[in-house]
Amino acid sequence: MSEATIYEYFGSKEDLLFAIPGEITKRAVDFMEHMAPYVKGAANRIRAIVYGYYQLYKENPYYSSLVLLDLKHNRNFMETESYREVRRAARLILDAIQEGMESGEFRDDVDPYLLRSIILGTIEHIFFRWHLKGRKDDLKDFVDDFMDVLLRGISRDRGEKTLRVELVVEDGRHLSRGGEGGS
């Protein structure tokens, strides 16, 4: 394809650069949206989305390098269709967090936007370092370890049981009250 033909579709080299990740991101988000109804529970949905990011970034290292190292910090990129797809992916995480809060699966005192930033920031940090280190690290345990820590912190039921003991004698007086503790 000649350079003149390319400029029929793209106004500048920057426009071409911004268009590159658009289709890959769109396909990945379409797949995640398609699979979401089949994944039960907000925690499982978030885990599946994080695995989606993991697979996308690891299997497409040039894509993840371009997005994370070059485009994410470019103000002009934020005005593109490609960036709208990036935002659509982030919205999937936010929706799952809010679903978990509404269903009672997650604590209701968690800021969903902050939690989404923690999730995306961790993914980006892990892959940013992966690229800077020459893609040598094996990241296979990253998702489960990260999600286990995250979900322990936001889950409403963290496996803790509270036991309250009250002893009442026949005349109705309370003699002692037990405290709270583990099961």
Image (cartoon, rainbow, N blue to C red):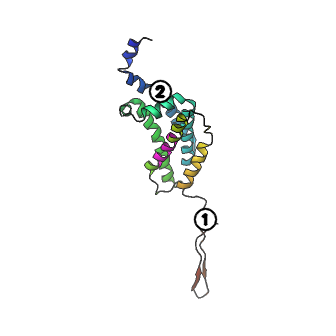
Which residue is painted at 61% across and 80% down in the image? 167
Mark 1: amino acid:
Lys
Circle 1: is it few (<14), some (14-19), or many (20+) Cα within 10 Å? Answer: few
In this rendering, is residue 52 above or below 22?
A: below
Which residue is painted at 50% across and 56% down in the image? 107
Count of marks placed on residues = 2
Residue extending farthest right: 183
Which residue is painted at 61% across and 75% down in the image? 165
In this rendering, is residue 72 above or below 146?
A: above
Q: Quadrant of residue 176?
A: bottom right
Asked whether residue 34 is in view, the answer is no
Indicate the position of residue 173 as horizontal and vertical percent values. Answer: 57, 86
Residue 34 horizontal side relative to residue 80, left or right: right
Main secondary-structure element of the magenta-colored stretch? helix
Indicate the position of residue 31 as horizontal and vertical percent values. Answer: 53, 33
In this rendering, is residue 178 above or below 91?
A: below
Indicate the position of residue 29 as horizontal and vertical percent values. Answer: 50, 34
Which residue is painted at 54% across and 44% down in the image? 46
Asked whether residue 58 is in view, the answer is yes
Q: Earlier in the sequence, mark 1 or mark 2?
A: 2
Is residue 120 shown in magenta? yes
Residue at which label 1 appears: 161
The magenta stretch spans which residues?
115-124
Residue at which label 2 appears: 23
Mark 2: amino acid:
Glu
Indicate the position of residue 35 as horizontal and vertical percent values. Answer: 55, 37
Q: CA distance from mark 1 to mark 2?
A: 48 Å
Is residue 62 shown in magenta? no
